[in-house]
Image (cartoon, rainbow, N blue to C red):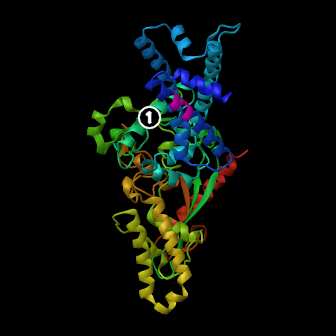
């Protein structure tokens, strides 16, 4: 059997082109089967191996198949003979003799054609499946997507595939995404891409087709208690607390506002921004089901409003606020606070909050220099603080170094020019922008009334940088200069809770 197949290959290898075609197809076929076997038994599990298995080998196979008829065409033209005459010369008489189902050569070609079709189809499906895996997206172009892959793996959506948001449904969306991927691959090979990757990503699927498949707006109701812990720069890194009762509902049933009011079915919010960057908002429209709308214009951006590209009007959805919900980069101080709160760093290590923040925030020329600089900074500080005490705290110091380096490694990527707060996070208003892009005194309607921007519109405040998590629920001290504010915040919370209870079934 093997000898007959070898003789067949020799018969169709009529010239150098045919020989190259045979080598490519045979090598690609055997290589694909071998690598796929290694993957199935768990020996190989790497995106770069996947590129070879599912992209290089199928491409080699198709090129090889294309070269074979080309070789025969050139051979026949050069010899000046018919195909039948050439077949008689290249193969034994028994192989080209006509039978009931045709000659042996014809049957071999038919069988191999069927095998080729099955192989290309199977490889094609495996290629598409491989390219849909997050590991491919994050590691195949590691220099470009490495930072996003690092952030994605530690995000709340680390089990949601990239294609669920970045590729649409249907054949058109898949083809468009793959063609765009080829363009991106070419740009990556030529190192012709922007650093950092510009945002926002305008090609994302609408949130109605992605986020709302799991997060159902009609079920956004009630409130959620959140406590954020911040640590001081003192010796003991003393904790202080900010506690918020977030009003996460749409405000539809209660007849009042809530954080998700913007995506309620009865509301439609549209806006235009400078350069379509979603940062500096030029105007906002609030449209209602009856077709009426109310426009608020940014009085600071009147010139931009007249020159705005009105073809780039955006309807507000989830990612206008949750713009970093998957690729989350941290604020430096918030990252240190988080690690201390989670117990990864000993809070009673002297000045640990202050020194970790100073170590990771310093300006380093490269990733490697940053990791080494963090180690030297922390080790040097504790060595100088107290040599004897430092020796006793060696394990805790080493742990602080490891955690600080992990924070730095996750958030700083010099080769893509990503530093602290390179990417704005619009969730809330801890960074510039966020809610205050629209909720500010400059956004006014024709009557001069501004969009509401009071704090209690979206949350009740139970503590703000206080020693007690629920400081404002206690009877306020009349001697406290903030007595009236504390009293107002306590009453606002109690009234909002009573109102919520009345509206619940």
Residue found at x 29% / y 45%: 300
Establish if 274 lies above or below 337. Answer: above
Name the residue furthest left. Answer: 303
In the depicted view, which residue is nearer to us: 428 or 74?
Answer: 74
Residue found at x 53% / y 44%: 136
Q: In this view, does 418 lie to the left or right of 129?
A: left
Q: Position of residue 310 (x, y in %)?
A: 35, 30
Residue found at x 58% / y 33%: 29
Q: Is residue 374 left or right of residue 46?
A: left
Q: Is residue 367 left or right of residue 105?
A: left
Quadrant that contains the C terminus = top right
Quadrant that contains the N terminus = top right
Task: Label 1: state its secondary structure.
Answer: helix
Establish if 350 lies above or below 494. Answer: below
- Residue 487 seen in the current view: yes
Tell how many labels: 1
Q: State the image quarter where residue 119 is shown.
A: top right
In the depicted view, which residue is nearer to us: 450 or 262?
Answer: 262
Q: Circle 1 is placed at which residue position? A: 182
Q: Where is residue 465 in the image (x, y as percent from the top left)?
A: 50, 69
Range drawn in magenta = 22-27
Q: Where is residue 376 in the image (x, y as percent from the top left)?
A: 41, 77
Establish if 50 lies above or below 63. Answer: below
Name the residue furthest bottom. Answer: 388
Prevailing secondary structure of the magenta residues = helix
Q: Position of residue 134 (x, y in %)?
A: 56, 45
Residue found at x 45% / y 58%: 430
In the depicted view, which residue is nearer to us: 155 or 153?
Answer: 153
Name the residue furthest right. Answer: 505
Q: State the image quarter where residue 242 is shown.
A: bottom right
- Residue 209 seen in the current view: no
């Amino acid at each position: 059997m093997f000898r007959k197949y070898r003789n067949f290959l020799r018969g169709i290898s009529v010239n150098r082109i045919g020989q190259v075609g045979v080598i490519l197809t045979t090598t690609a076929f055997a290589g694909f089967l071998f690598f796929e076997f290694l993957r199935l038994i768990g020996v190989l599990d790497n995106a770069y191996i996947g590129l070879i298995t599912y992209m290089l080998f199928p491409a080699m196979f198709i090129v090889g198949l294309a070269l074979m008829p080309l070789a025969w065409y050139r051979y026949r033209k050069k010899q000046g003979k018919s195909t039948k005459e050439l077949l008689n010369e290249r193969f034994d008489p028994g192989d080209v003799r006509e039978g009931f189902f045709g000659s042996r050569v014809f049957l071999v070609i038919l069988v191999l054609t069927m095998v080729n079709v099955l192989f290309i189809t199977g490889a094609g499906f495996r290629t598409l499946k491989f390219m849909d895996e997050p590991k491919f997206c994050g590691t195949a172009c590691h220099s470009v997507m490495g930072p996003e892959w690092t952030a994605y793996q530690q995000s709340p959506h680390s089990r949601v595939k990239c294609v669920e948001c970045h590729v649409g449904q249907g054949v058109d969306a898949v083809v468009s995404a793959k063609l765009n991927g080829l363009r991106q691959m070419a740009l990556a090979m030529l190192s012709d891409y922007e650093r950092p990757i510009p945002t926002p990503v305008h090609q994302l699927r609408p949130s109605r087709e992605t986020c709302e498949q799991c997060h159902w707006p009609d079920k956004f109701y009630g409130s959620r208690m959140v406590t954020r812990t911040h640590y001081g720069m003192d010796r003991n890194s003393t904790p202080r607390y900010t506690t918020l009762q977030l009003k996460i509902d749409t405000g539809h049933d209660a007849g009042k506002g809530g954080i998700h009011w913007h995506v309620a079915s009865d509301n439609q919010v549209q806006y235009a921004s400078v350069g379509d960057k979603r940062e500096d908002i030029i105007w906002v429209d609030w449209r209602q089901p009856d077709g009426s709308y109310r426009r608020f214009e940014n009085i600071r951006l009147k010139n931009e409003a007249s020159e705005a590209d009105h073809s780039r009007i955006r309807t507000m959805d989830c990612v206008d606020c949750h713009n970093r919900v998957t690729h989350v980069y941290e604020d430096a101080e918030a990252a240190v606070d988080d690690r201390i709160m989670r117990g990864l760093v000993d809070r009673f290590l002297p000045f640990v909050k202050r020194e970790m923040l100073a170590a990771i925030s310093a300006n380093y020329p490269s990733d490697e220099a940053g990791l080494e600089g963090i180690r030297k900074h922390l080790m040097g500080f504790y060595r100088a603080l107290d040599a004897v005490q430092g020796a006793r705290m060696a394990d805790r110091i080493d742990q602080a170094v490891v955690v600080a380096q992990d924070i730095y490694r996750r958030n700083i990527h010099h080769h893509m020019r990503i530093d602290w707060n390179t990417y704005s996070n619009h969730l809330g208003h801890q960074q510039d922008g966020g809610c205050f892009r629209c909720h500010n005194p400059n956004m006014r309607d024709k009557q001069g009334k501004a969009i509401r921007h009071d704090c209690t519109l979206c949350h009740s405040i139970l503590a703000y940088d206080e020693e007690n998590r629920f400081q404002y629920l206690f009877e306020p001290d009349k001697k406290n200069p903030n007595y009236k504010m504390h009293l107002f915040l306590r009453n606002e919370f109690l009234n909002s809770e009573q109102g919520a209870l009345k509206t619940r079934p």
